[in-house]
Amino acid sequence: MSGAASFEYLMGLHAAPTLAGPKPASLVSFRKSSFEDFDALFASYRTCFDCKGISCCLAEGEKCVRILFYRAHALEAFLSSPKVRTLLERYGYGKSASLEEMLSELTRRMQKSVTFPHEVGLFLGYPPEDVQGFIENGGQRFAYSGYWKVYANEEETRRLFDCYTDCTHKFCRKLEEGKRFSEILQAG
C-alpha cells in the first residue's frame, strides 16, 4: 500500500465517523516515520479537508503527530452545551473561551503530556456523563466499553457505536473499492 493509500486508510479506520459526518471530532495518531514525508503528505490533503468543512488541529511530538479532525460548527455546538461547558470549566478552560482558544489549550496540554488529558473525550464528542464517570472511576466500573468507556445511557450509546462502526466499514470499503478519498468525504 502506498504512503497516500495507507494514510487514507488509517484516516478512514480511525476518523470515518467525523470524515463522513455524524461525529463532531476524531483524534488520529500517526507515526511520522511510517511515511516518507509525512508533513508533505498531510499538507497535500489540507485543501480537500477545507473544501469539505473539516478542520484539523495538530499536536506534534518527536515521533508521532496527533491530529484532531473536526467539524467546527458541530464541535462548537457540542462544547457549548451546559453540561459539557461546566466540565470544561472545571478542567481550566475559560468560561467564555472560543472554540479556537479551547483547541489551542487542548493542543498545548497534549503536547506537554505523554498521556491524554481526560477532557479530550469532550472534544471528541463523548457524552459528559461518560467523561465524568471515567475521571471519577479512574477508568474502572464502566457499564460497557466500545469507542469509549460508557458509564450512562448504555443502550443509546451502543446504538451510536453501531452507527460509528457501520460508517467506518462503509468508508473503508469504498477506499478498498478504489473510490477517491475526496469523493468519500462528506461536506459539512
Image (cartoon, grey):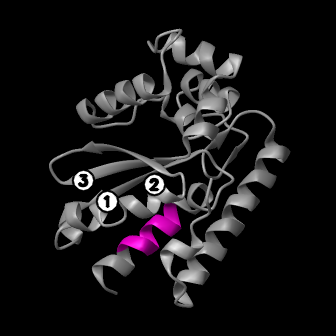
Q: Which mark is residue 80?
A: none
Q: Amino acid at mark 1?
A: Phe
Splitting the image into 4 quarters, where does residue 50 fall?
bottom left
In the displayed image of the protein, which residue is found farthest to the bottom? 177
Give the mark, 3 or 1, whose residue is nearer the N terminus: 1
- Whichever of callouts 1 and 2 sits on the residue coming sooner in the sequence is 1
The residue where tag 3 is placed is: 64
Separation of residues labelled 3 and 1 (CA atoms) = 6 Å
- The residue carrying mark 1 is 30
Could you tell me residue 75's position as x and y percent?
A: 59, 37
Asked if labels 1 and 3 touch by Cβ distance under 8 angstroms, the answer is yes
- At x 62%, y 63%, the residue is 186
> At 52% from the left edge and 90% from the top edge, which residue is drawn?
178
Determine which residue is flagged by label 2.
Answer: 50
141 part of magenta stretch: no
In magenta, the rendered stretch is 7-14
> What secondary structure is found at the residue carrying circle 2?
helix
Towards the viewer: 64 or 146: 64
**Which type of secondary structure does the marked residue at label 3 adopt?**
strand
- Which quarter of the image is occupied by the N terminus? bottom left
Q: What is the distance, in whole Å, between disc 1 and disc 2 at their CAs?
A: 20 Å
- Give the residue at x 58% y 73%: 184
Q: Nearer the viewer, mark 1 or mark 2?
A: 2
Crowding near the residue tagged with mark 3, few <14, some 14–19, many ≥20 C-alpha atoms within 10 Å: some
Is residue 78 placed above or below 91 in the rendered structure?
below
C-beta proximity under 8 Å, tags 3 and 2: no
- Are there few (<14), some (14-19), or many (20+) residues within 10 Å of tag 2? few
